Image (cartoon, grey):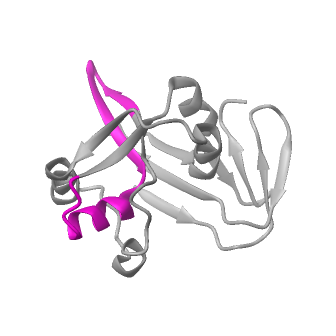
Amino acid sequence: MNISREPVRQVTIFTPEGATQTTLSRVEAYTWNHPDGQEITWNITRARDLIGNRPPDFPVVLANMRELLANNPNAPEFNREYAMTTDLTKPLFVVLMFEGQTAHLVLIDGWHRVMKAVATNTAQLPVCVLRPNEDMACRCRFEPALNAMVPLHP
């Protein structure tokens, strides 16, 4: 697992609709290693745009957040100082992944909010589940030659 926070610079984003968008803001991506060895990357900036102000799907409770941090060998290295500045009203983003016949929710955005919630004993956090079409629209790879996040499923 890897969290990529591209430095602030001009980045071109190729959208699934075929348009390109050039931005000076940071593009955030999250890479997860599936147990079968497949590496999957999501463009978190695009996920935020797609979800917009949609209401959360459900809350996650403090005990589950503690378990995420304590038992997940893929948990990223946290910047505690940054975590304590995060907005706990913003929902966590998760996607549904399968390992054989077993479904798992994978946290793709909100690790620092989880850390803050655990540190401050926050009872629960809101969660948005990316729908299958949103999940696919956000899967990407970074193309260094283009300095761009390129979608896998146009």
> Which of 63 and 28 lies nearest the eye of the viewer?
63
From the image, which quarter does the N terminus lie in? bottom left
Q: Is residue 139 visible?
A: no
85 is higher (above) or lower (below) than 126: below
Quadrant including the C terminus? top right
Q: Quadrant of residue 105?
A: top left
Give the magenta part as a residue range: 96-123
**Residue at horizontal 58%, vertical 31%?**
134
Q: Among all residues in the image, which is located at the extreme bottom?
A: 81
Q: Position of residue 98 (x, y in %)?
A: 34, 26
Above or below — where is 132 with respect to 41? above
Residue 65: give x, y in percent of width and height: 22, 53
The answer to whether residue 118 is magenta is yes
Identify the residue at image location x=37%, y=31%: 97
Residue 126 image position (x, y, % from top left): 36, 45
In the displayed structure, does residue 146 sit left or right of residue 77?
Answer: right
Task: Find residue 22 and report its image quarter.
Answer: bottom right
Q: Is residue 121 part of the magenta span, yes or no?
A: yes
In the image, 143: left or right of 124?
right
Q: Judge by depth and name the residue closer to the eye, 103 or 152.
A: 103
Q: Is residue 122 above or below residue 134?
A: below
Query: Residue 13 location in percent, x, y?
Result: 76, 50
* Most foreground residue, 99 or 15: 15
Residue 138 can be seen in this image: yes
Residue that appears at 49% across and 33% down: 130
Question: For the image shown, how many numbered marks are present on the structure?
Answer: 0
